Image (cartoon, rainbow, N blue to C red):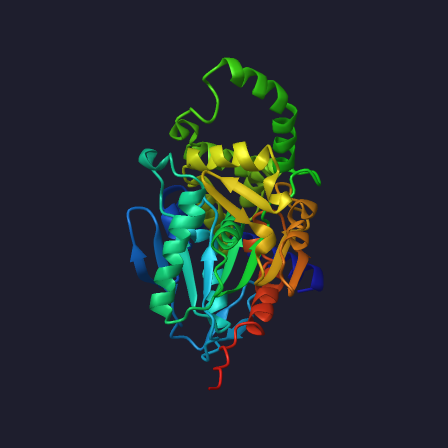
Amino acid sequence: MNDLSSRLLAQGLEINRRVTRAAANSVDWLFKRDTLIKSGRTWFELVHDSDLMAVRYYSLPDEEEIELPDGTQMPIRRRRHAVPLVLVPPLGVTTEVFDLMPQRSLVKFLVASGFKVYLVDWGRPQKEHGHLGLQDYACDMLGDALQKVRKHARSEDLSLLGWCMGGLFCLLYQGESKDPRVRNIVTVASPIDLESGSGVIAGVAGVAQALDGPARLVSRYSDLFLDTLDPALLSAPPWLTTLVFKLTDPLASVTSYWDLMARLYDREFLESHSTTSDYLNHMLMYPGGVLRDMARNVVGANQFASGRVEFGDTVADLDAIACNFLGFAGDSDRLVPGEVAHRIVDIVASGDKDFRVAPGGHMGVIIGSSACNAVWAQTTQWLATRSAARRKRGR
């Protein structure tokens, strides 16, 4: 048999294998899709569980190493860093965002890197939670969660890591409480200066500012303004939260299904696609109280960029935050571009502060294929040198 015949035979056999695998995968995708979803597989201990908010603790796995997104193995560091790390997700998404796939799990990566990892779970808000605002989440619930972490970890010192709105919660908590035992804060894709650049959120802020004058005029003659409106009426239902996220990259929503059809034979790709789609299609209600506070005091007035944020009877002085700080932005983030997120470095009073741009869009920067070697790795390296035990003072 000549070389041409051999190549044709090999190609024919490969096509046959792909068709067979694609047929089997199609059955699972159509009728047993739950078997393809791999999110939330990392074991955790429930440290605290209330009506809405819960706190999870992720302990060391039994394995000696974990698999990374590129297929390589990472040895698990058994010696723990002294300062526990608390992950703070944004609202509107499930906690699976930090544990998306077995080989693409931020919580597992952080645990393997030697950190005691805790996660604040905001729960699944219902209609009765629609009135909750920034003070409820950033001050009351986050403050309560950190108390539970300190008791469980037996450590007063903590590090906080927040993505998007979760990063804003970290900043608001620290700016309001001036907590002296928060050692480090890391934010990823958190919007600060809405007047400094482009992006979806900055565009919304521009519209709000353009309408500010007419809105003030109307409010003088009408009772229909934010202060008197029941905040629960402003709550965004889950389908709207999903739509907003997908509209940040509408082309990807279309091309992802084309990629699915073209790679239906690839089981690993099918599991990744199904897991990500399930996450995006099952987002949560966004409480109207938070949306009202953001629209009234943050988006329209651009208060985060001023360093002083007022919400309700509370004031958060971001320019008084003195703990170590590291900020990230995605280089292709259409929702929160780098120039919108970078302003925080100029605001906080930290002597040790840095800001970096990493590969990915708004979601990709924290859970994308490049996140492991960028945001995850850089965060663990940065925190490791700032998470040692405090030296005991001599008599």
Residue 324 falls in image quadrant: bottom right
Viewer-proximal residue among 390 and 98: 390
* Residue 355: percent from left, percent from top: 67, 58
At a point 34% along the width and 67% down the height, the residue shown is 152
**Is residue 164 at all visible to an observer of this figure?**
no
Residue 239 x/y as whole percent: 44, 33
> In the picture shown, does residue 112 fall above or below 339?
below
Quarter-of-image position of residue 359: bottom right
Residue 214 visible (yes or no):
yes
Please, is residue 172 above or below residue 389 in the view?
A: above
Tell which of 14 and 183 is nearer to you: 183
Q: Residue furthest top?
A: 221
- Residue at 45 percent across and 48 percent down: it is 138
Q: Quadrant of the N terminus?
A: bottom right
Residue 50 in picture, x, y percent from top left:
29, 51
Percent of width and height locating residue 24: 43, 50
Q: Residue furthest bottom?
A: 395
